[in-house]
Structure formats: structure tokens, C-alpha cells
Image: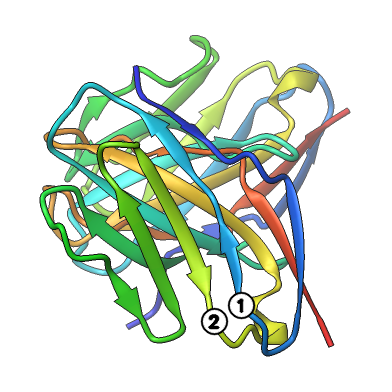
């Protein structure tokens, strides 16, 4: 089936605006992950869902970052009051089963905060 | 906390030649998994190869193979018969047993020259 999709692919926001980034995992995949990739760096873990339960949000950098997956499929990462340091590519990944599975990544959303 | 180090920010190789990308990691865990991911300029992260730490045999996947040295905490990737399509960022990643949080290195930019 289709891979992980993310939208929008590019987002430009003015400092202080709220943004919402969407992730559609592979159909039937139980686990979903969000990563932040700054320019020239490797991805860094933000948060993880198993179905609709958010099991780990230890990587969220501040309380301005919020993620949800209310029905256990599509997920939204919301950033409130964006700051310039939030500029990055936000990657979503999913796995079929929750245990030690290979993660399949989406193309990412490139966020630029001006 | 686990760390992953990729000491080669950039590398280049001629088409059809062999290249080795290095990765070292630091962990006190005995149960873990290691991955190499490829990220072409389009930014979709693709799994290249996966190694379970409990397996002594090095993983191979067509032209890609790893040299896993558990005692030295080293996990290098060998690409044989390099092709132009191998041009990409390559990330080494670590997954602790029982965790779902991938830890990435900073990446190596590989360029395959015609």
C-alpha cells in the first residue's frame, strides 16, 4: 500500500503563529513517531504513539509542542507560538507492530519560521 | 543515554568502487538494534540495513553490508559497486531493546561521482 504521507510538505510561518502538521501512517500501522531534524543534523525523537495512546513525549522541546492521534491513525503535531528555533524538518514514521520494528518514514514537513 | 557518532561528515567515491561509512555508538545495554538509513535529496528516509546485537553474523542486503564489532561498539556500512543513486545522506541509528526511540548520528553525506 501507500507509504507514510505528510502534509503540508512546506510551511512558512511568522513568529508567533500556530502551525499544525499532519501525518498519515501506513494503513494498519500501530505505532507512530515524530522526529525533528534540524539543518545538517540527524533526526531527534519528539514523541511516540501506540494506537491512540501517547506513550512517550520526552522529546518534545517545550509545552508549545503538542501531538495527538485521537483515532489511532492520523496524527497531528501542533506547535503554538512558533519561534525561529522551531525551523526544521518534521519527520513522521510508523511501524506495523509496537515492538522493535523497523520504522518507515514519511517525506517530512519543512517548517520555516520567519 | 546512548550516543551515536559518525565521524565522516562527507565522503565521495567513484562509481563502481567500494566505500565504507563508519559509525560508533556508546551504550551499556546488551540488547539493542542498529540501523543504517539513507536519506536522498528528496528527504524520504529509507532503511538500508538492520542488525540485531545478539546476532554475530553481519547483516547484508545486496550491495550493502555491515561490519558489526560489538566489543568495539562499531557498526560500519560497506557499499560495493557504488551507483549514482547511492548519493545521499546516510544515518546510523541505535535502538535500545525495550525502547521505541531511535537515536541517530549526525549523518554522512555520500557523493558518488561518475
The residue sitting at the top extreme is A63
User: Vertically, is A24 above or below A3?
Assistant: above
Chain under disc 2: B
Looking at the rendered structure, which numbered label has been put on residue B18? 1
User: Where residue A50 sits: x, y (%)?
Assistant: 18, 41
> Going 40% across and 50% down the picture, which residue do you hit?
B75
**Left or right placement of residue A47 versus residue A90 in this view:** left
**Left or right placement of residue A35 versus residue B88 in this view:** left
Q: Nearer the viewer, residue A98 or A9?
A: A98
Q: On the image, which quarter does residue A76 sit in?
A: top left
**Left or right placement of residue A37 versus residue A77 in this view:** right
Precedes in sequence: disc 2 or disc 1: 1
Q: Secondary structure at mark 2?
A: loop
> Going 84% across and 27% down the picture, which residue do you hit?
A14
User: Vertically, is B24 above or below B83?
Assistant: above
Task: Specify the color scheme.
Answer: rainbow
User: Vertically, is B106 above or below B38?
Assistant: above
Q: Secondary structure at mark 1?
A: loop
Q: Quick one: quadrant of the N terminus of chain B? A: top left
Contact (Cβ within 8 Å) of mark 2 with mark 1: yes
User: Where residue A74 sits: x, y (%)?
Assistant: 35, 52
User: Where residue B34 sits: x, y (%)?
Assistant: 31, 49
> Going 44% across and 76% down the picture, which residue do you hit?
B64
Q: Which residue is mark 2?
A: B80
Q: Nearer the viewer, residue B73 or B84?
A: B73
**Left or right placement of residue B54 versus residue A58 in this view:** left
**Gap between marks 2 and 1 measured at Cα:** 4 Å
Q: Quick one: quadrant of the C terminus of chain B? A: bottom right
Amino acid at each position: 500500500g501507500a507509504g507514510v504521507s505528510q502534509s503540508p510538505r512546506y510551511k512558512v510561518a511568522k513568529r508567533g503563529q500556530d502551525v499544525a502538521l499532519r501525518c498519515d501512517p501506513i494503513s494498519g500501522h500501530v505505532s507512530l513517531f515524530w522526529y525533528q531534524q534540524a539543518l545538517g543534523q540527524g533526526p531527534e525523537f519528539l514523541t511516540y504513539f501506540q494506537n491512540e495512546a501517547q506513550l512517550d513525549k520526552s522529546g518534545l522541546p517545550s509545552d508549545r509542542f503538542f501531538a495527538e492521534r485521537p483515532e489511532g491513525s492520523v496524527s497531528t503535531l501542533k506547535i503554538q507560538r512558533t519561534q525561529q528555533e522551531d525551523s526544521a524538518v518534521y519527520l513522521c514514521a510508523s511501524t506495523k507492530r509496537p515492538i522493535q520494528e523497523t520504522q518507515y518514514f514519511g517525506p517530512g514537513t519543512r517548517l520555516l519560521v520567519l | 543515554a546512548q550516543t551515536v557518532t559518525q565521524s565522516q561528515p562527507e565522503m565521495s567515491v567513484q562509481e563502481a568502487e567500494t566505500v565504507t561509512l563508519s559509525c560508533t555508538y556508546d551504550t551499556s545495554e546488551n540488547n539493542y538494534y542498529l540501523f543504517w538509513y539513507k536519506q536522498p535529496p528528496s528527504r524520504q528516509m529509507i532503511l538500508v540495513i538492520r542488525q540485531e546485537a545478539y546476532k554475530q553474523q553481519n547483516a547484508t542486503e545486496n550491495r550493502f553490508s555491515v561490519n558489526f564489532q560489538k566489543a568495539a561498539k562499531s557498526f560500519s556500512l560497506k557499499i560495493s559497486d557504488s551507483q549514482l543513486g547511492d548519493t545521499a545522506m546516510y544515518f546510523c541509528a541505535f535502538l535500545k531493546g525495550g525502547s521505541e526511540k531511535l537515536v541517530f548520528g549526525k549523518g554522512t553525506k555520500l557523493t558518488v561521482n561518475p
